[in-house]
Image (cartoon, rainbow, N blue to C red):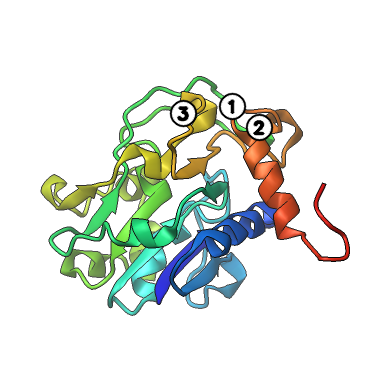
């Protein structure tokens, strides 16, 4: 069973469902998809006020939610799987505490969806796709108390993990079409500036695939697909 945690924000609930449908539709193995919804995180109170979405900090609770055992995948909700998530799962590395795509770029926009600031910072978007080695001793640092009090810089830069214990995924597993442009070889699309459900981002590169997946997520045999 592949444990997957997907960020959920009620302001773009459709994003969670589209992402989840793409996971299920392309998966060759059983997956357990868990929404990271703040109301369901008993024992954790979100006190940060600088987040652009409701799962910007709760993603770091995944090892805690897994009882610090096994492996799990975290994905932002504004994503779409174009390939089998079992292939991503195969890239686990027991010698690492986490495995991520190590982006190094400067954003092209100072503002993203719903008017949120979009600042450049070291290791930007490293935490948007994470293979969590939940049983690694270093990840026991991530208690609800620690996550609730740590800064964004501490968390999103994985400051509790030495650099040599942060593994690296191929960039195709966290491709940013709205920043990098189209890539037909991408395995996972991430519209980091804004999910195509928002009017301002409905025509971003490769957004047609997101709109198609939304139709598939709403599919009923009697309604058909246009």
Q: Are marks 1 and 2 in contact (CB under 8 Å)?
A: yes
Residue 8 appears in view:
no
C-alpha distance separating marks 3 and 1: 8 Å
The quadrant holding residue 73 is bottom left
**Front residue of 172 and 132:** 172
Picture residue at 76% right of the left edge, 33% below the top: 199
Q: Secondary structure at mark 3?
A: loop
Instruction: Point out which mark residue 111 bears.
Output: 1
Place of residue 222 in the rendered image (x, y in percent of width and height, measured from the top left)? 88, 65
Q: Residues within 10 Å of mark 2 (few under 14, many from 20)?
A: few
**Front residue of 70 and 189:** 189
Q: Secondary structure at mark 2?
A: helix
C-alpha distance separating marks 2 and 3: 12 Å
Instruction: Point out which mark residue 115 bears.
Output: 2
C-alpha distance separating marks 1 and 2: 6 Å
Picture residue at 24% right of the left edge, 65% below the top: 139
């Amino acid at each position: 069973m592949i444990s997957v945690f997907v960020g959920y924000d009620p302001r773009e609930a459709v994003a969670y469902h589209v992402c989840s449908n793409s996971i299920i539709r392309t998966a060759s193995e059983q997956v357990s998809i868990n929404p990271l919804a703040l109301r369901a995180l008993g024992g954790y109170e979100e006190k940060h006020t600088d987040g652009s979405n409701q799962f910007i900090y709760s993603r770091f609770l995944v090892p805690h939610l897994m009882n610090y055992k096994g492996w799990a995948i975290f994905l932002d909700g504004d994503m779409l799987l174009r390939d089998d998530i079992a292939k991503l799962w195969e890239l686990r590395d027991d010698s690492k505490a986490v495995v991520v795509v190590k982006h190094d770029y400067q954003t092209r926009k100072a503002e993203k969806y719903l008017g949120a600031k979009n600042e450049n910072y070291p290791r930007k978007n490293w935490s948007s796709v994470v293979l969590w080695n939940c049983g690694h001793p270093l990840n026991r640092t991530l208690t609800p108390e620690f996550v609730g009090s740590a800064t964004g810089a501490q968390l999103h830069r994985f400051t509790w993990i030495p650099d040599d214990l942060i593994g690296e995924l191929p960039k195709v597993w966290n491709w940013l079409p709205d920043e990098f442009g189209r890539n037909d070889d991408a395995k996972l699309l991430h519209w980091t500036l804004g999910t195509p459900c928002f009017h301002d981002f409905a025509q971003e590169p490769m957004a047609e695939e997101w709109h198609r997946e939304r139709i598939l997520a709403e599919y009923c045999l009697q309604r058909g697909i246009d």
